[in-house]
Image: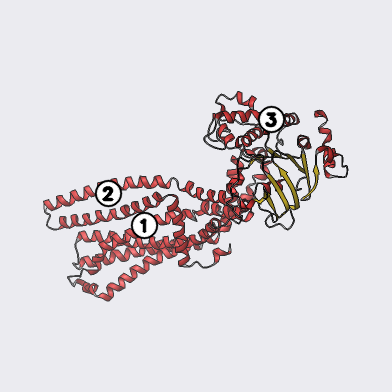
Amino acid sequence: MSKRKSPVSFKNTVHLSLRGLGIWWRENPCLLLSILICGIIEALSPYVDIWLLARLIDEIAGARDQQQLTVYVLALMSTSAVLSLLCTGLTRWKNTQLASLWHTQNKVFIEKLLSMDFADMDDSHVQELRSQIWQNTDSGGWGLYKLIYSFETIVRAIMSIIGASFLTASMFILPVKTNDGGSMILNHPILVLLIFAVMLGVTFAAPVLSVKAGSYWIKYADENQLGNRLFGFWLGELGNDRSKALDVRIYRQDILSRNNLKKYNPFIPTSKLAKASRGPMGGYSAMSGAISQLFVGVAYLFVCLKALGGAFGVGAIVQYVSTIIALSSGLSTLIEALGDLRNNTPFLHTVFNFLDLSNKMEQGDAAINQYNRNGYEIEFRNVSFKYPGQDNYALYNVSMKFHAGQKLAVVGMNGSGKTTFIKLLCRLYDPTEGEILLNGINIQKYSYHEYMKLFSVVFQDFKLLSFELGQNVAGSIAYDYGKAVQCLRKSGFGIRFDKLPKGLSTALYKDFDENGINISGGEAQKIAFARALYKDAPFIILDEPTAALDPIAEFEIYSRMEQMIGEKSAVFISHRLSSCRFCQDIIVFHMGRLTQRGSHEVLVSDKSGMYYKLWSAQAQYYKAVD
C-alpha cells in the first residue's frame, strides 16, 4: 500500500472529498440536507439559551426589574421548548436518512460491479480493490462512509464557531475599568493579542495531536484489513453460509484454528495497532486531552480577571466562559475533522480506483432482429483467447459455424476450453485474436444488451435466490403465472411443484421466510432449467446441465430435451457423453483447440480421436440406457 505512505496534498483531499460527497448527493440528497439543516439548528441553539441566560443573570444581579425578568424567563423557556422540539424532529429525519447509509453505499458498488466488463469483474485485482474497500469501511469507517460523519462534524463545528465568535468577540473589546492589582494591563492591545494567540495555539495543537494519533490507522491499515478479512470469514462466511456447512463440521478443527486468528487479529493486545495504542498513539491522544484542559484554564483566568476589573458583569461571565470554551471546541473539532479527511484521502483513492475502472469492451449500437429466430448464424473465425494475466491460450485458433435450430454438444476434458468457448459466445469476454460473427457482423458492433437477450444460460455454478419460486423462474418480481408453471413442468419439476401449498409463491430457502423450502441439488437444477426456458431466448446454453442428477433422472431429462427446447438452438457442455447422442453436431476441444467435429456415430468410429477415448472411458455407464 505504498500510496498510503506518500504525502497527501490539501488540494487532493478537497477534490476527492467533494467528489465523494457528490456521490452521496446523487444517491440521496436528503441525507446531506438533513445533516446540514440539523447541524445548523443544533449547533446554534445553545447560544440562544446562553445569551438569554446571561441577560437574565445580569438582571437578577442588577436592577431586578420584575417585568424584564418575566420577559427573559418566558423567552428562555419558549425558545428552549421550540428549539428542542425542532431539533428532535430534525434529528429524527436525519437518523432516518442515516439508517440507509450502509445500503446506499453498497448500492453504489454493486451498480459498478454490474455495469463493468465481466472480464474486469472476474479479475483478481478488481476483487482485491473491492475487498480493500469493505475492510477499510469495517475497520474504521474509512472511505465514503467517513465523509458523511466528517461532513456532519464540519457543519456543526463551523456553525458553533460562528455562534461562539459572535458572543465572544466583545470579551476582548470591553475594557477593564478599575486598576485594582494592575488589571488595567488587560486593556493593552499586545497583551490581548498575546492571550488570543495562546488560546488559538492551544486550540490548534490539540486536534493536530489527535489527528496524529489517528494516522496510525493508516499505518497499520494492511494488517487491519487482513485481520478483519479473516475475522469476518471465520464468524461470517463459515458460520452462516449453508454451502460450506458440511465441510466446516467435518474439518472444523483445522479450518477454525484460533491460532490463525490470534496471529492476524488486529483486536488483540499483541497486534501492532494495540501496541501503538499503548504507545505513541495513546500518547498523542493523552497530550491532546491535556492541552484542551490547558485552554480551559487560560480561558477561565482571562475571563475572571477582566470581570474583577469591572469589564463586564456576572451574566457576561457565564456567557463568555461558555462560548469561549465552545469556540475552542468548535475550532478543535473542525481541525480534527479536516485531519480525518486528510487521513481518509488514501482510502478514497482506493474507492475511486475501483469506481473509475473503465469498460474496455466495445459497445456497438447495431440492432438485432429479435424475431428472426430462424435466420441466426454464429461464426467463430480464427478465435484465440488468453485470460487476463495469463501467458497460455485458453482457446487457440478456433473456427466454426453454428446455425439456428441446431443442437450442438461441446465436449472435452477438464480445462480443454469448453466453458471459455461459452463465455466468448455470450460475450462475457472478447477474443484476444480473431472475431465472432452474428449473421456476418462482428458481435462487437451490436448493442451489448440486445445481444445478451439472444441467450438463456444454465451455468454449472448457477445460483438461485432466496425469493419466491415464481420470481426465481422469471428472474423478475412480476411474472406470467401460467408461463412459469409450464416451464417448471417442462423442466421436470412438476411433481414437486404440485406438492407445494403456496405454489409459485413458495419461498426458496429460509433466509427471508421461515416457511421457505430447502431444495435438493437436482431440484435446483430443474428450476434453473425452467428459468432458461422462461426467458424464451433463441439460444439455450446448458453448462453441465445434469451434473446434480442421477443417471436415471439424466436420461429422463434428455428424453424430454426436444420437447423442452423445441426449435431453439441449443448448446450442451457435458462430461457425460450420453448427452451427445441427442445432438446432431458435436465439437471436441482438447488443450484449447477444436480437434474434432461431427455426429456421435462419425466421431465414435474414429478410434484415434479424443471423442472415442472419452466415450470408451464412460461407455460402461451407458449400457443400461442403450
Q: Residue at x 29, y 47 (%)?
A: 86
Answer whether residue 486 is visible to the viewer in this image: yes
Q: Is residue 129 left or right of residue 551?
A: left
Quarter containing the C terminus: top right
Q: Which residue is mark 1?
A: 155
Dot 1, how many residues are within 10 Å of its Cα: few (below 14), some (14-19), or many (20+)? many
Precedes in sequence: disc 3 or disc 2: 2
Q: Residue 105, how many percent across, how many down? A: 49, 50
Tell whether label 1 touches label 2 (CB within 8 Å): no
Residue 211 appears in the figure: no
Q: Which mark is residue 83?
A: 2
Which of the two residues, 474 or 155, is positioned nearer the viewer here?
Answer: 474
Kind of residue sitting beneath label 3? Gln
Tell whether 308 sits left or right of 480.
left
SS assignment at label 3: helix
| SS for dot 1 | helix
Is 468 drawn above or below residue 606 in the view shown? Answer: above
Nearest the viewer among 255 and 347 is 347
Q: Quick one: label 2 or label 1, which is nearer the N terminus?
A: 2
Label 3 belongs to which residue?
A: 563
162 relative to 417, above or below: below
The disc, 3 or 1, on the residue closer to the chain's N-terminal end is: 1
Coordinates of residue 237 in the picture (x, y in percent): 60, 43
Instruction: Quote the CA–CA distance across marks 3 and 1.
Output: 66 Å
Q: Amino acid at mark 2?
A: Leu
